[in-house]
Image (cartoon, rainbow, N blue to C red):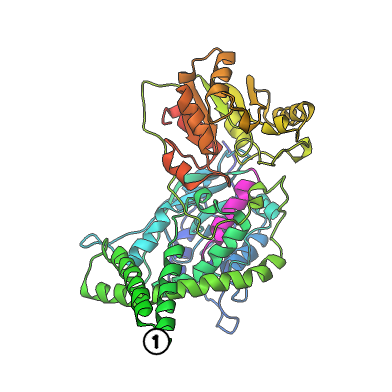
Amino acid sequence: MAERQRFAVVIPTVGRPSLGTLLASLSRSAPHTPDEIIVVDDRDERCPALAVTAGDVKLRILTSGGRGPAAARNVGWRATEAPWVAFLDDDVEPLTGWAARLAADLSALPQEVAGSQGRIAVPLPVHRRPTDWERNTAALEEACWATADMAYRRDVLEEIGGFDERFPRAFREDADLGLRVCAAGYLIVRGERRVCHPVRTAPPTVSIQAQAGNADDVLMLALHGPGWRTRAAAEGGRTGRHLLTTAAGALAAIAALAGRRRSAAAAATGWALGTGELAWARLRPGPRSPGELVTMVATSLVLPAAATRHWLAGWLRLPRLLARGSPGPLGPARNPLALAPALSFFPTGRRIRPGPADPSWSAEAVLFDRDGTLVVDVPYNTDPALVALMPGARQAVRRARQAGLRTGVVTNQSGVGTGRITPDQLLAVNRRVEELLGPFDTWAVCTHRPDEGCGCRKPSSGLIESAAAALGVAPQRCAVIGDIGADMKAAQGAGARGVLVPSRSTRRPELAAARAVAPDLLRAVDYVLAGTC
């Protein structure tokens, strides 16, 4: 019989009444009870002590001084020696058998898997359409790495420094941790355990209060680059529209004070259109009851300005936050995606999607792009010591080989043609890639300059056709995995299938045009094996 997987449960709390229900549920989970339950009281220290119990399960109550959920979770996981730490919010309700399913989710996970995400159900009304607040809460069902139910290996938390306490509220701190875990080369999987997350009662102004998260998005952009929303599978925000609406309103006021009536009228029209569009976008999918109508219209009048204020505040506080440093090592060997520059104020996300299923197609070979796909893109890299694997690269290549697929690398290396890289340096870097990933069946490398007009440089199809010929496989039976549109166009030109794995170099139109978009290399190989690319 396999040894039971040991785990602790950490619950940050602000003293909600639901905490007692949660602890009672965990106390009835024998024989799969946690090693211990650690409740971290994140209220002001002047509040009375919590009076809660967990039956026969070991329970400790710690405090974090009201510093926010990131700090509270750090206090909790650092206090336990259990190899796995499961984080729960104090307002979730574990379904029957949660602890047993958690133990099953964690059992026999390979070392490259650092996290296991639970499944969250948000009950919505059945007799009417959900309100704006209810829909926002229901987004937890599709969120990546939501700490409402998320388990991590303790040694990985130790390695990367845990939650970043520069995120002061329950927003983005979980996405930041997930991105850093993946950037360190680990994988996060979804388990089968389930919790219920009821919609909490909220004041009519909750949407305005939530705009404080715009400041945290600025920090995410600075830490993880303009592609962070795509990598975290986060929905695109409305920051750009809020800024334009607010600017139009401010311009209308200034022009009116200056006596420029036409300019004021034009700017006021722009403000009214932006506000009206926002209000309708929030009202259209909802119940449109009188109360919801009043709330949506009233808050939409204020919401763009609130979002803009927090966004600007985020930029003002950013130098101070960055000066505090990161919670863990951020060098290129352990956190390559953190090297992405903050180039865009308005990053947008797009849902990850497989391609249409095609039962008649099966792959015989998979061809990987090198830079930005298998390894971190270091421009014109001449130093093998700078080669760092992208998240999941080792596992993805191994899975393809174990499935019987031939493997190859197809890469543009114009640095040779321009004299920035010598042929020997290119070979040394490629050898290092194979040291980390094992030998590939073929390499197809274009060393021409972009202006030479060769037929091999991607987005032309020559590299794909050459690699297929070297493998003895028809191009139509090859899959190409890459991070930019040129990889996908090369695949299409050769008649091969393509899967896009977004990186910091991926552009929005490339995401829209791709037949299949995967969140990571391992999922991309899964798409290839399933014929959904």
Q: Residue at x 61, y 26 (%)?
A: 409
The residue nearer to you, when weighing 80 against 168, is: 168
Amino acid bearing label 1: Gly
Camera sees residue 509:
yes
Residue at image x 58%, y 47%?
A: 504
Dividing the picture into quarters, in which one does residue 465 lie?
A: top right
Q: Is 488 contained in the magenta span?
A: no
Camera-nearest residue between 429 and 93: 429
User: Which span of residues is magenta-colored?
Assistant: 171-185
Total marks shown come to 1
**Magenta-span inclusion, residue 184:** yes
Q: Is residue 20 left or right of residue 328?
A: left
Q: Is residue 294 left or right of residue 442?
A: left
**In the image: residue 288, left or right of residue 148:** left
- Among all residues in the image, which is located at the extreme top? 472
Q: Residue at x 50, y 75 (%)?
A: 309
SS for dot 1: loop
Residue that label 1 marks: 259
Residue 513 image offset from top left, x and y in percent:
42, 39
In the rendered view, tell whether residue 54 sits above or below residue 264. Answer: above
The x, y position of residue 142, in whole percent, is: 42, 52
Looking at the image, can residue 95 be seen?
no
Q: Nearer the viewer, residue 65 or 323?
A: 323
What predominant SS class does the magenta segment belong to?
helix
x and y, in percent, of residue 471 in the image: 57, 15
Q: Residue 351 location in percent, x, y?
A: 42, 47
Tell me the crowding category of disc 1: few under 14, some 14 to 19, or many 20 or more residues within 10 angstroms, Cα based.
few
Quadrant location of the N terminus in the rendered image: top right
Residue, x 68% and y 65% (percent of image)?
322
